[in-house]
């Protein structure tokens, strides 16, 4: 959910110094940064790392639920 909130915030102007925004970035960046390093930035400047992160997190969740 936090990644989705971050995606929505990227579409609207917001104060990057707001404490909630800072916390949101601190929580989501460890998930998005490794994906961003692997994926090349598209020429349009679009960041697809949240989409890939959603798929990876879903895959990990499915594996963990099967292991239980």
Image (tube, rainbow, N blue to C red):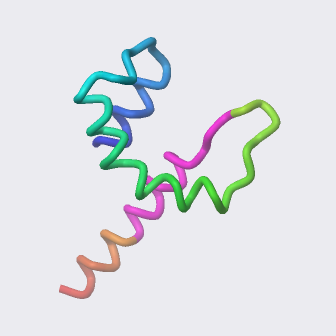
What residue sits 41% from the left and 57% below the top?
A: 30
The secondary structure that most of the magenta stretch takes on is helix
Q: Position of residue 50 (x, y in %)?
A: 49, 46
What residue sits 82% from the left and 36% below the top?
A: 43
Q: Does residue 44 appear left or right of residue 6 in this picture? A: right
Asked if the magenta segment contains residue 34, the reply would be: no
Q: How many marks?
A: 0
Q: Position of residue 21 (x, y in %)?
A: 31, 29
Q: As displayed, is residue 19 above or below residue 56? A: above
> In terms of depth relative to the viewer, which is nearer, 5 or 65?
5
Quarter of the image for the C terminus: give it.
bottom left
Q: Does residue 13 appear left or right of residue 23 in this picture? A: right
Q: Does residue 51 appear left or right of residue 48 in this picture? A: left
Q: As displayed, is residue 19 above or below residue 51? A: above
Q: Position of residue 39 (x, y in %)?
A: 68, 56
Asked which quadrant contains residue 48, the reply is top right
Q: Look at the image and give the residue range highlighted in magenta.
A: 46-59
Q: Does residue 44 appear left or right of residue 26 in this picture? A: right
| Residue at the left extreme, as displayed | 68
| Residue at the front extreme, as displayed | 17
> In terms of depth relative to the viewer, which is nearer, 38 or 1?
38
> In terms of depth relative to the viewer, which is nearer, 37 or 4?
37
What residue sits 47% from the left and 55% below the top?
A: 53
Q: As displayed, is residue 65 above or below residue 32? A: below
> In terms of depth relative to the viewer, which is nearer, 60 or 41?
41
| Residue at the right extreme, as displayed | 43
What residue sits 44% from the left and 32% below the top?
A: 7
């Amino acid at each position: 959910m936090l990644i989705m909130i971050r995606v929505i915030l990227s579409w609207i102007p917001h104060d990057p110094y707001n404490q909630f925004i800072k916390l949101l970035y601190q929580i989501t960046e460890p998930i998005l940064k490794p994906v961003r390093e692997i994926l090349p930035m598209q020429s349009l400047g679009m960041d697809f790392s949240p989409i890939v992160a959603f798929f990876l997190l879903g895959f990990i969740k499915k594996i963990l639920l099967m292991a239980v």
